[in-house]
Image: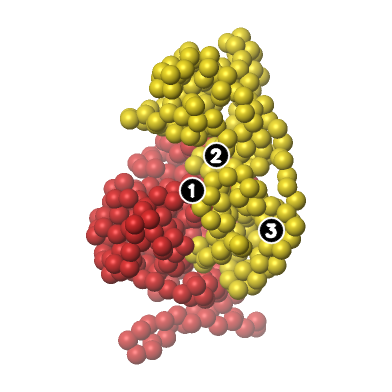
Chain colours: A red, B yellow
Amino acid sequence: MIELLEVPSPLTVQDSGRAGYRKLGVPVSGFMDDYSARIANYLVGNPGGTPLLEFLLRGPTIRFNASSVFAVAGDVDVSLNGTPIEPWKSYWAKRGDVLKAGTLKSGLYGYVAFAGGIKCEALLGSCSTYPRAGLGGPLKAGDRLNLGYAMLSGKEGRYLPRELRPDYSLRKKTVRVLLGPNLDRFTKKGIETFLNSEYKVTAESDRMGYRLDGPVVEHSEKGADIVTEPLLPGTVQVPAGGKPIVMMRDAQTTGGYAKIGTVITVDLPVVAQSRPGERLRFEAVGVEDGRELLVKRERALMAIRDFLDGKLRAYRIKTGEEELVAFAKVEKE
Amino acid sequence: MGPVIKPLGDSALLISFGEAIDEETNGRVHALARAIEGANFEWLVEVVPAYSSLAVIYDPLMAGLEEVEGAIETLFGVPQVSSEGRLVEVPVLYGGAHGPDIEFVARHNGLSVDDVVDIHSKPTYRVYFLGFLPGFAYLGGMDGRIAAPRLERPRLRVPAGSVGIAGNQTGIYPLESPGGWRIIGRTPLRLFNPGKEPPTLLRPGDRVRFRPIDGSEFVELYEREWGGEDD
């Protein structure tokens, strides 16, 4: 069991999300940044979608009431019993140990994963918190959480090399979108504005959606309001004011504003990790590009998982300017 | 004319039957949704119907756009079995503290409060789809004689079960939420219960009839549904 000693900002339990209930109006929810969250789980030997803690900007202070293996994902200072330790690395905690995660130096969401995961009662097939519908609630200081059963030995000391960590610090982030499906609701000029401008993430942003500020995207004479249609996390709606809104994991399942495009799956974490004040640029890609990039990312994540499991070795290689990491099978002796 | 298929990001398709809000179009949406769900495609994640369109969410690691599109197109020709859905009776305590805007709706339309109750509880409404909030039903079939504009300033807190009117639409708030609809009454039924499977009282394609009840029946039903939980 763990106990939350300090919860300085919104902290929730999340997993890979709630599939299958969208037709009943229930959002999918789940990790805002599924790339970082899954790696956090792999670091402690869990399947990628295991329930963990997601914090916004400022990390919690946690006391272990039983020994456990944990890892923190994010660009953040971490300490165990006051001694600095590293993020992106798994550690053994004994009964009574206190873990403190500080404020993220870049990015917006950080993760704390535990071997065996947070034990919770799945509601509608998921432990993801969605307080509006009574599906869990935000956590507070004093809350105690049980951890799932896990073999702990061999799970500590796993480390994600710097080259493989996501870079949240980019000042200008380019986010790839698949344009449509309501392009007839925008003028040619409006679509060009959307693709050739910078948009600032505003403070009116949460797990439901990120409101952006920037040049007005011009609607066609058909206007901004459509007959309510389904939408997805990543969908960019543009209301009559012309300022885009990127829908996120807790987005409602349908919406009545014209949709100019949808962020491709692999770039949704980039949006999620953008703080209010940071800037995004949108780039149009083709329909197969998103899928190819996703297949590539999934392969990379599987390689990272196998590397952390000790099944693959990682090599640093230099190709011209770029430093890359390559993986090779660990040969059995 | 056949529906139009467009990608909605890299993991979904939006299939649109135009922009009409009517039973015939919505019936086609649900018939296709059922056909897709019934075909057991291994790449299918879920289907989300709306008024005149539906989203088909698929796993892009299992199938590409062309494969998904091709598979769905083969279902366009499938004869559409019309489904009436279930008939769900929703008891409503109209007016009073639970329906603070019913007098406005009456006055706005030159009717008495009793007229509003009669007109609202007469038709059988169709659940076009669920969206906005878990369990929120978009109902079709409200009589235009009781139409009313939304509040100029939405309320910060509308209790779960509140029955409202906005323009030509009527609906029920499944959860406590902010809202700008004119509230004419409240049902003691629980529209969304995360501990139940399925979690929603109403489902797409169902039919709804409102039945006026009095305060004592409200209390009795409320206690049965909510079992001592706080209001």
Q: Which residue is mark 3?
A: B36
Q: Which residue is mark 1?
A: A228
At 29% across and 59% down in the image, what residue appears? A218
Co-location on one chain, circles 2 and 1: no
Q: Residues within 10 Å of mark 3 (few under 14, many from 20)?
A: some
Contact, CB < 8 Å: mark 2 with mark 1?
yes
Q: Which residue is mark 2?
A: B138
Residue A269 visible in rendering = no
**Front position among marks 3 and 1:** 1
Q: Chain of mark 2?
A: B
Viewer-proximal residue, A298 or A100? A298
Q: Is residue B103 above or below residue B153?
A: above
Residue furthest toward the top?
B216
> In the rendered structure, which amino acid carries the disc numbered 1?
Thr
Q: Locate the N terminus of chain B and report the quarter of the image it occupies.
A: bottom right
Q: Nearer the viewer, residue B159 or A324?
A: B159
Is residue A312 visible from the viewing direction of this image?
yes
> CA–CA distance between discs 2 and 1?
10 Å
- Which element type, helix, strand or loop, lies under badge 3? helix
